[in-house]
Amino acid sequence: MTQRIERAGLQIGQPLHDLIEKALPGTGVDPELFWTELAELVAEFGPKNKALIDHRAKLQDTLDQWHREHRGDQFSREAYRELLGELDYIVPEGEDFSVSTDNVDPEIATVPGPQLVVPVTNARFALNAANARWGSLYDALYGADIIPETDGAEKTGGYNPKRGAKVVAWAADFLDAHFPLAEGRHADAREYRIDNGQLAVDVDGSHVGLADPKQFAGHQGTASQPSAILLAHNGLHIEIQIDPEDTIGAEHAAGVKDVVMEAAVTTIQDCEDSVAAVDAEDKALVYGNWLGLMKGDLKEEISKGDQTFTRELADDRVYTAPDGSELSLPGRSLMLVRNVGHLMTTPAVLDSQGNEIPEGILDALATATIAIHDLKRNGPHTNSRAGSVYIVKPKMHGPAEVNFTVALFAHIENALDLARNTLKMGIMDEERRTSVNLKECIREARERTIFINTGFLDRTGDEIHTSMEAGPMLPKGEMKSTAWLTAYENNNVDTGLECGLRGRAQIGKGMWPAPDNMAAMMEAKIGHPEAGANCAWVPSPTAATLHAIHYHRCDVLARQSELESRHKEYLEDLLTIPLLDRELSAEDIAKELDNNCQGILGYVVRWVDQGVGCSKVPDITDTQLMEDRATCRISSQHVANWLYHGITNENDVRETLKRMAKVVDRQNEADPSYHPMSEDFDASIPFQAACDLIFKGREQPSGYTEPVLHARRRELKAARAG
C-alpha cells in the first residue's frame, strides 16, 4: 500500500508528494503554498465539479426517459429540439464576438502544420515528439509505403541504392513544386551557393535563383560552400542539407544528402487518453516527465542493436540570414499539455474526509506550476517564447463546464502569481453538448482559447451513449458518411472562424490511425488543411514529416479566409441520430462484433496488464493501428447498443469475446511480458475489463471507459503487489 503524507489536510501518495517537492525549487512556489492551494481548490471547485457531473447524469436520465416514451413513434425533430432547449442542453446563442487571446506563439496562431499527440508517461516518445519539429524527408520516404517496393526498390536490411535514388527523385519533385527555380529543376542542380545574399544554383552550367527569391531564408556554412540551405513557404521551413562526403551526398551532383522538413510545429504532451495513470506512482511519472520537458533536462537512454545513446531535447537551429545577420529557429515543437477531463477522481490525493480528489484539479495545478520553469527560463531551452502555458482540456460538456475550467485557471493564476490569462485553453469539441453549443463554449474562454478540434471517435462514442435509448445504431464504418458527422466537422471550422480564431488559435482535425499506411495518409489527409484546419493529428514523427507536405500544397490561412463567409446552420444535422435504417444479415452482425470485440480486447489487454495507454495495436486484419481510449469508447458503446436493442445477444457477444481473445493472444505471442487471456478467461482481469466495458456499457457515465479501466488496472496492480 502506498504511504501517504499529510499536507494542508490532504493525504498525498508519497511518490506524488516527493515529485512535487522536487519540482518546486526554481518556480518561486514553496511547498506550503502548493499544498494549501491544492486544498483550497479541492474545497472550492470539488463540489462544483461534482455538480457538473451530476448534471450530466440528470440530462442523460431525462433523454433516456424521453426516448423510451417515444420509442416506436415517428421521430419528431421539432419535439426533440424543443426538449433540448427546455433542458438547456442547447443554450441560447449570444451576439457575435471574436476571441481576444493574446501572447500566443506563432506556432499556435500563424504557422499551420502537423500536430503530434504523445503519452507523456513514455519519456522516449515524449522526446521524439518534441524533437519532431524537424524530420528527414529522405528517411520518411525511404521507410514508408509511398514509394512502391517494385523495380528493385525494396526496403532491404541495408541501404538499397535503387530505392534511395527514387527517394532523391521524389524529394526533388517536391522542391520543384514548392520551391521552384527560375529555370531548370532541382534534380539537375550541380551546386548550391550564396551570392550577394541570394541563393544561386548551378543548373547545367547556368547559375539561377529561385523563382520567388523571398523563399530563401538563410544558410549554414560558408557562402561558397554552404552545408544547409534554408527555404520558407507557407510559414514552414525546409533545409537542403549538403555534404559531398556523406554516403548519400556523394551520389548527388550538388552533394545534397537530405531534405529536412519543418514538421510537427506543435506537440500535445498527453496526461489523458493515451496514458494509463491510476495512482500516485503513475501521476508522479506523468508530472516527472512534464517537469523534464519544461526544465529541458529530460533524457532517455536508448539502445538500438549494439549501440546505446542518450535522447534529449534538440537545440535551436542557427543560420546566417540573407542580410548576414544571425537567424535562430526553434529546434523543438511548441509543447501543449493535455489535462484529464472533469469526470475522474484520483487516489493519488485524498481530501480531509478521505475521498479521492478530482483529477482534473490536480492536473491543472501541477502542470501549470511545473510550466513556471519554462516561463522563468530555468532551463537551456524555451518552450513558449510568448510566455504562455497551453493546456488542452478534453471532454467538457457545454459552456458551463468551460466556464468552470476558466474559473479554475484564473484561481490558479492568482495563487501562483501568474499574469491573467497566462494559462491558455484548448477546447476539444468531442462531446455532443459541446458541438451544439460550440460558439458559446468558445465565448466562455474567449480570452484564453488557443485551440479547438474535432475527434470522430470520442464524439461518436458520446453520440451513441447520448441516444442509447433511441434505437440501434448504424455499423461504425457507416457513421463516417452520416449527416451529423459532416455537419460536426464543418461546424467546428465555421464556428472557429466566426469566433475569430484565424491568426490567433488552432482549428484542428483528428488522428490518422494507421502509422504504417503512409501512402493512404498522403491521399486522404490533404483533406484536413483543405477543410480549413491549421493543424491535424499524426501518430508518429515520420507521419508528421510527410503530413507537412500537405501544408505546402495548401495555404491554410488563405483557405480559412475563403471559408470565413461559408457559415451555415448545422444544428438540425448535428441532432440527427445515426440510427440503423435496415435489417442486417447474420454475417454483417458477426463481422461487426468481431471487429469491435477484437479492437476492445487488443487495446484493453495492454492497458490493464501492462499500463500502456497508447500503442500500435493490430486490428482484426493484423493492420497496426494507433489506439487510445477513444477507440475503446466507440467500440464498447457500439456493442452495448446492439446488445441492448437485440441486434445481438449476450451469449453471442461472450463467445465472440472469447474467440477474439485467442486472436489477440496470437497477435501478442512474441511479447515476453504478455499474459494470454484465453488460458483462463475468468481469471484474466483484462478480459473481465473488456466484458465490463460492454455488459456494463450503458451505465458508464457518457460511455467513458476510464472508470472500468482504472478499477481493473488497480485490481491487477494490487494482485501483483500482494
Image (cartoon, helix red, strand yellow):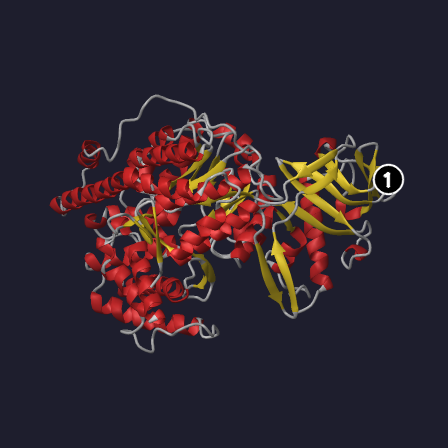
Residue 200 position (above or below residue 340) = above
- Which residue appears farthest toward the top when viewing the image? 95
Secondary structure beneath label 1: strand
Decide if residue 385 is in sight here: yes
Residue 192 position (above or below residue 692) = above
**Nearer the observer, 79 or 105:** 105
Residue 103 position (above or below residue 703) = above
Q: Residue drawn at (39%, 62%), measured in percent from left and top?
A: 607
**Kind of residue sitting beneath label 1:** Ser
Q: Quadrant of the C terminus?
A: bottom left
**Nearer the observer, 722 or 666:** 722
Residue 500 left/right relative to 85: right
The residue identified by callout 1 is: 206
Residue 66 left/right relative to 27: left
The picture places residue 407, in percent across and down from the top left corner, at 35, 33
Q: Residues within 10 Å of mark 1 (few under 14, many from 20)?
A: few
Q: Residue drawn at (33%, 62%), measured in percent from left and top?
A: 714
